[in-house]
Amino acid sequence: MQPRTPVLPHRRRQIRSPGGLAAARDLSAAGIKVLVCEQRDRVGGLARTETHRGYRFDIGGHRFLTRVPAVQRQWEDTLGQDFLGVRRLSRIFYRGRFFHYPINLANVLLNLGPWESARVVASYLAARTRRSPHDDTLEAWVTSRFGRRLYEAFFKTYTEKVWGLPCSEIRADWAAQRIRGVTMRTAVADALGRHKDAASLVREFRYPRLGAGQMWERVAAMVGEAGGTVRLGTTVTRIRHDGRRAGQVVVRAGDAEQVIDVSHVISSMPLGLLLGCLDPEPPPDVLAAGRALRHRDFIIVLLIVDAPRAFPDTWLYVHAPEVLAGRIQNFRNWSAAMVPEAARTSLGLEYFCTKGDSVWSRSDAALLDLAACELEALGLAPGARVEDGCVVRQEYAYPVYDEGFRANVAAIRGYLERFDNLQTIGRSGMHRYNNQDHSMLTGQLAAANVLGGRHDVWQVNTEGSYAEDPPAGG
């Protein structure tokens, strides 16, 4: 008898498809018939690569970096010689100066000067002597480990740009997950060349020659070659179930709807959207928990400038409070193949926002003007002229770790645990700020569960993340 089809649904407003595609690849390779539904016109989710006039650009920057050997091998096997090694240079731009990140103490003290440096050291010593055990917010967590002066210079402004919340309202769970490996002790040791954990202060990463999306485009092709199906422009609207098992998925492409019998569902869409698709719907308290989960949205403004080079970094964190941009990608420095013209380069100015706010609601023309003006104000491409550009908006980019998120996720998980054949994966499907490899690993474990395994995908990334991540967001 023909096995029913596992469906891996994605919504346009979901974040990343690496997890879903990783699951689809493993299942199709095992002879299982799979269907991946993606509402956008290309795969990759937040890790996709867009194009404009032949200029390729990612929706943010996506390093390929992992401590999981099996994930590393799969990446290398997928792209071969198109999987490049990139020397990392990413700095913080603050007060018109460049500061290394991860924080290098010697560089910080040199840039700040003797008087401000003395205040930083005094602030750090005061924090260590008065450290409170109640560091449950990001502000308290960072201040107790670095001191208030470094917190205000290198964490506060950028973090609040990313999340749109005061640091005093962001849970420490985020900091513990994303920047746990960076402490003043490691910063000092790194400055002296004595840091023993080379993996935590990463200086090089891997990257596809044609952008992050090249990896997932190739994985989608592999799914097709193995007999699976990847449908673009297709929305999952309903997941019909009997309270224990999902039995059918309703999908829409254009004006046409189709009902598909399924044996398993693996979802990477935001948890709140998933709950809204369930038919019959969950209890009111579970629906309320899904609606209460908050996300931060994202806009990237690509600028093509008439200069072969700009700054030497792969990306910059912009801590300058006088501009709205939070981060700037320099795509030529990720891969020269991203930029088709040697006399020009492309820069991606990133704006963290919330759908409907004053930034999100600006027209594309106004955003292009804003980005060009801010690039000039920052002095990062002196003498260069902006020739062209485009704007891409991305909803549900970052799950917000606010005061209620933990209880809301727990309520949703408790409800979903009753299903035998419905799994959630990835950054949005778990409302967890996963790295790309973590999202991929959750997909692989979910696929293994379909094949008879008993893995808890929620245990992925509970050990914390890598210290090469942003100071506090993005």
Image (cartoon, rainbow, N blue to C red):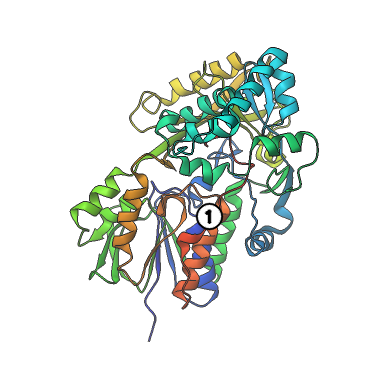
Front position in the image: 130 or 412: 130
Front position in the image: 21 or 383: 21
Q: Quadrant of residue 413?
A: bottom left
Callout 1: SS: loop
Residue at the extreme right of the image, as rendered: 193
Residue 289 pos. (x, y %): 27, 49
Residue 288 pos. (x, y %): 23, 48
Residue 459 pos. (x, y %): 49, 60
Q: Is residue 25 above or below residue 407?
A: below
- Mark 1 crowdedness (10 Å alpha carbons): few <14, some 14-19, many ≥20: some
Pointer 1: what residue?
461
Q: Residue at x 49, y 19 (%)?
A: 370
Q: Is residue 369 left or right of residue 265?
A: right
Residue 250 pos. (x, y %): 28, 62
Q: Quadrant of residue 329?
A: top right
Does residue 308 appear in the picture of this structure? no
Q: Residue at x 66, y 40 (%)?
A: 338
Residue at the extreme front of the image, as rendered: 129
Q: Residue at x 65, y 59 (%)?
A: 75
Q: Is residue 408 left or right of residue 312?
A: left
Which quarter of the image is occupied by the N terminus?
bottom left
How many dots with numbers? 1
Q: Amino acid at mark 1?
A: Asn
Does residue 469 appear in the picture of this structure? yes
Q: Quadrant of residue 458?
A: bottom left
Q: Is residue 82 above or below residue 229?
A: above
Q: Is residue 307 above or below residue 191?
A: above
Q: Is residue 187 above or below residue 81?
A: above
